[in-house]
Amino acid sequence: MAIKQFKLPDVGEGLTEAEILGWSVAVGDEVKVNQVLVEIETAKAAVELPSPFAGVVRDLLVQPGSTVDVGTPIISIETADAEPVTKGAPAQQESKREPVLVGYGVAESSTKRRIRNKSVHGSTAEVVAPVVAVVTKPTYVLAKPLVRKLAKDLGVDLTAIAPEREDGVITREEVERVARGATGSTATAPRTLAAPVGETRRVPVKGVRKATAAAMVASAFTAPHVTEFLTLDVTRTVKLVARLRELPEYADVKVSPLLLVAKALLVGLAKHPEVNASWDEPAQEIVIHGSVNLGIAAATPRGLIVPNIKAAEQLPLRELALALGRLTATAREGKTALEDLTGGTVTITNVGVFGVDTGTPILNPGEAAILAFGAIKQQPWVVTGKKGTAKIKPRWVTTLGLSFDHRLIDGELGSKFLRDVGRVLEDPVASLM
């Protein structure tokens, strides 16, 4: 038998710390290799860590809500694959590593010596103290990230809730019940569930929000931003979205105006590839990327993230729609893979879903352009007929806002690119054909 400690690994991109969101195991549980132990939140996304060891959980070394550095021991597991090192005996060879499901290797193990006592006959024997857990209040909870955020917003202590489900997972309904102070609740709601008017609250900045804040400051004060706006008639785009939704091949695909905005952006980049670029400061070079990794800014409970679709220019319209659907769904669930959060070359931020007309978006660090897609609204619009006569008609109208890095993109290039993106949205059928 041996006690091994699992240290917090670097799950990618040189991350230095992570927050422990919640444990999936408890002291005394028997775990298998690759069984999920804990959910952590890095500066990129939420990640589930599997166990590199098989054995019995002996100690949870870090409480949920704590932020710890990479390399910090977070859990102790008693395993049966190695003997402890005894006094005077040579150190045993490192036990064979077990395969794991993520890209990090098995953490270095540490071996604790067992206490040896002399028996009445003078012989040496191993004495292992039994593990006795006396729990007066749970120190860990099982709950999904969205439920944790809801509890935090409502001021509900998750450790005070006795879960009703057999698997011990706390549900949204249980949190809301405690927040309402309903009779028959399995827990006692805190006395103060919401901050009274005038009370000041402090919210720790960590995880995704901390990384986003640092990135936006760095971007705003490193790249000289220029923003241009274009208001246009997208009535034909709205009609094409309706037509696509009726086609059998799109029956199981989510089709929205964002799909055609993404396609219009890709068409614009095909005409102006210099926009799909980044600035290499050490080399003092402009890097024009050969492929478009299309980022979509997504608001999640943990903060703003920008997952991207790799080689988006190669996808036909239906496949692009499927990729957008998968991207937004995984982002909403907090399950975006780390590789999907890196390598972006250009970004779209859809502020229109919030009813906002447009904005001046800040560049995603390392990219030269970001397009803000505003709300689509019916407005009076001057329409020119075939004979040159002008009439005022109700049309679907939106405003695009393009921010770009003026070191790479001058006013002429930025203006032509925005114009060509707008032309696709004004007449998508003719442009895409």
Image (cartoon, rainbow, N blue to C red):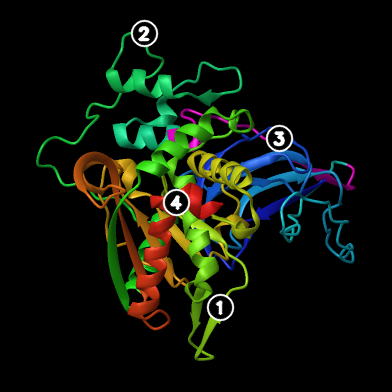
2 or 4: mark nearer the eye = 4
For discs 3 and 4, the disc positioned in front in the rendered view? 4
The answer to the question of whether label 1 and label 2 lie on touching residues, with beta carbons closer than 8 A, is no
Image point 35% across, 46% down: which residue? 234
Q: Quadrant of residue 24?
A: top right
Residue shown at 53%/73% (left/top)? 273
Instruction: Using the image, determine if residue 244 lies above or below residue 336.
Output: above
Left or right placement of residue 40 versus residue 78 in this view: left
* N-term mark: 2 or 3: 3
Q: Secondary structure at mark 3?
A: loop
Instruction: Note whether residue 109 is visible.
Output: yes
Q: Which residue is mark 1?
A: 288
Could you classify mark 3 by the number of other residues whose Cα lies within 10 Å: few (under 14), some (14-19), or many (20 or more)? few
The segment highlighted magenta reads 121-146
C-alpha separation, residue under disc 2 versus residue under disc 3:
38 Å
- Residue at x 90%, y 43% (from the top left corner): 121
Q: Is residue 13 magenta?
A: no
Q: What is the three-letter code of the residue carrying label 3? A: Pro
Between disc 1 and disc 2, the foreground one is 1
Disc nearer the start of the sequence (3/4) = 3
Instruction: Please tell me whether mark 1 sits on a helix, a strand or a loop.
Output: strand
Which one is in front, 146 or 77? 146
What residue sits right under mark 2 in the picture?
Answer: 184
Residue 32 x %, y %: 78, 38
As drawn, the label of residue 261 is: 4
What kind of secondary structure does the magenta stretch mostly adopt?
loop
For marks 1 and 2, the one nearer the N-term is 2
On residue 130, the disc is: 3
The number of callouts visible is 4
Asked if one can make out residue 188 in the rendered structure from this viewpoint, the answer is: no
What amino acid does circle 4 point to? Val
**Label 4, label 1: how many angstroms apart (C-alpha)?**
22 Å
